[in-house]
Structures are given as C-alpha cells and as structure tokens.
Image: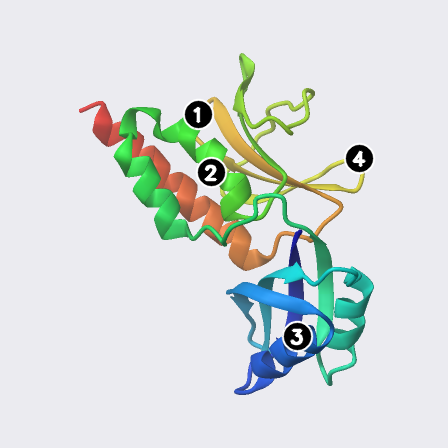
C-alpha cells in the first residue's frame, strides 16, 4: 500500500539523502519525492511517496525520520491515489486537452495534484455544481477572493479560491496535513489558468 509522508528537513545538501536512507532502513521503498515548500528559515518541506515492505508499520518510518537531526515528520497517511505524484503542469495539459470542460476537470484533478481527499465547485445560487465522490454534501458558498484557508468546525482542513463572481473552488483534507502557503499559492495559480483556458474555449 502506498503511503505519503510529509517531512520537514534542513534545506542543505545531503538532508534528503539522509531521510531517504532512514526510510529505506525502516522498510520503506521510495517511489517519488516532491519539494512542497522552501522556507526563508533554511528549512524545506517535501512529500515522499513510498511503498511499505510487508509487516512494516508507519510508526517505524516516523521514528526513523524523527531520529535525524532537525528532521520532523509532519504527517503520514495512506495515499489512495497511488501511482505517482501528479504535477501542476500535467494538470494543465489535461485541462487544455478539453478546454470546454476545464473547470469541472480541474475539480477532478485537484485532489491528486494537491494530495487532498476531495474537490468541489460551489455556486452561491445553486450549491454544489461539481464535486469528487468524497466531497461533503453540505458544502456552501463563502465569499473568498484569493486562495485562502477556510474555517471549519471539525478537524477537516479546507482551502478555497474564487472561480468567478458566483462560484468558488474548495479542496479538503481530513485530519491533515495543513495547506502550506506555497500550496495555497499554487491552488490560486492553477484555478486562474483553468479559468483562462475555459474562457479561451468560448471565443
């Protein structure tokens, strides 16, 4: 079963190699790594997609990483999407392949692109316009401008961005990890591209 590990580590040569070695020694086989964020304080946040050897527990991966100096596992969970990490450029390619359906296709792609649990397009007038299967049924429109975190009443984490005057796009994670500033900025950029692609198809 694939697992996704979000790890915070020093942004210096050799750090990722130390983490990879620790994961391997603990029984994890790394499939892909994506840099999520580089911070001004000299740390980085990476997402590591890995397969567990039979009998290996997630706790052993966490312990092996946390035992390294200045390394911290932020979050670990099963990664149902499997396969590989879906990059933003690949999402844009899919949107341009069918520009007339770009906005709904964007919603379908966002959970994989951002390792979220669901995505939804919500209208101020009509409620949920389009959503992935795991999206909550009680989502409502809220006024947002640029991409930002949305308040929730539970441990779910929502991030939203305005799609047009009457619609927003929301993505959500159950229990974590938190959406980082870099992810929020990426979401805003990707939604902006989808809107441009959709408009171009109408002219």
Name the outermost residue toward the front.
54
Q: Residues within 10 Å of mark 3 (few under 14, many from 20)?
A: some
How far apart are the two marked residues, 3 and 2, measured between alpha carbons? 30 Å
Disc 2 secondary structure class: helix
Q: Which residue is mark 3?
A: 24
Any part of residue 42 in sight: no
On the image, the x and y values in percent for residue 59 come to 82, 64
Mark 1 and mark 4: Cα distance apart in space: 26 Å
Is residue 190 at least partly visible in the picture?
Answer: yes
Q: Secondary structure at mark 4?
A: loop
Q: How much space separates mark 4 and mark 2, taking CA atoms?
A: 26 Å
Given residues 5 and 165, the one toward you in this image is 5
Q: Crowding near pointer 2: few (<14 within 10 Å), some, many (20+)?
A: many
Work out whether mark 3 precedes mark 2 in sequence or the reverse, and give the earlier one.
Answer: 3
Q: Earlier in the sequence, mark 3 or mark 4?
A: 3
Cβ atoms under marks 1 and 4 closer than 8 Å: no
Q: Nearer the viewer, mark 1 or mark 3?
A: 3
Mark-to-mark CA distance, 1 and 2: 22 Å
Mark 2 lies on residue: 109
Q: Which residue is mark 4?
A: 153
Q: How far, Cα to Cα, is label 1 from label 3?
A: 49 Å
Q: Nearer the viewer, mark 3 or mark 2?
A: 3
Along the horizontal axis of the image, is 87 left or right of 181?
Answer: left
Q: In which quadrant will I find the C terminus?
A: top left
Residue density around tag 4, few if under 14, some if 14–19, many if 20 or more, within 10 Å:
few
Mark 4 or 2, closer to the camera: 2
Q: Give the SS element for disc 1.
A: loop
Q: Quadrant of the rendered structure where residue 8 is? A: bottom right
Write down the residue under mark 1. 165
Q: Nearer the viewer, residue 185 or 46?
A: 46
Whichever of labels 4 and 2 marks the residue nearer the N terminus, that label is 2
Vertical relation: 199 (above or below) 70:
above
């Amino acid at each position: 079963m694939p697992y996704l590990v979000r790890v915070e580590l020093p942004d210096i040569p050799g750090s990722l190699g130390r983490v990879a070695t620790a994961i391997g020694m603990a029984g994890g086989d790394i499939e892909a790594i994506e840099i999520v964020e580089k911070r001004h304080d000299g740390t980085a946040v990476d997402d590591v997609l890995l397969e567990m050897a039979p009998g290996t527990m997630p706790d052993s991966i966490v312990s092996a990483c946390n035992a390294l100096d200045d390394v911290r596992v932020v979050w670990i969970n099963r990664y149902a999407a499997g396969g590989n990490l879906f990059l933003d450029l690949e999402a844009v390619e899919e949107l341009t392949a069918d520009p007339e359906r770009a906005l709904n296709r964007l919603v379908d792609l966002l959970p994989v692109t951002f390792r979220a649990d669901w995505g939804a397009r919500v209208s101020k007038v009509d409620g949920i316009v389009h959503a992935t299967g795991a999206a909550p049924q009680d989502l409502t429109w809220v006024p947002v401008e640029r991409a930002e975190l949305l308040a929730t009443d539970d441990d779910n984490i929502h991030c939203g961005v305005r799609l047009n005057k009457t619609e927003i796009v929301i993505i959500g994670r159950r229990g974590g990890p938190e959406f980082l500033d870099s992810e929020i900025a990426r979401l805003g950029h990707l939604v902006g591209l989808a809107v441009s692609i959709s408009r171009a198809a109408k002219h």
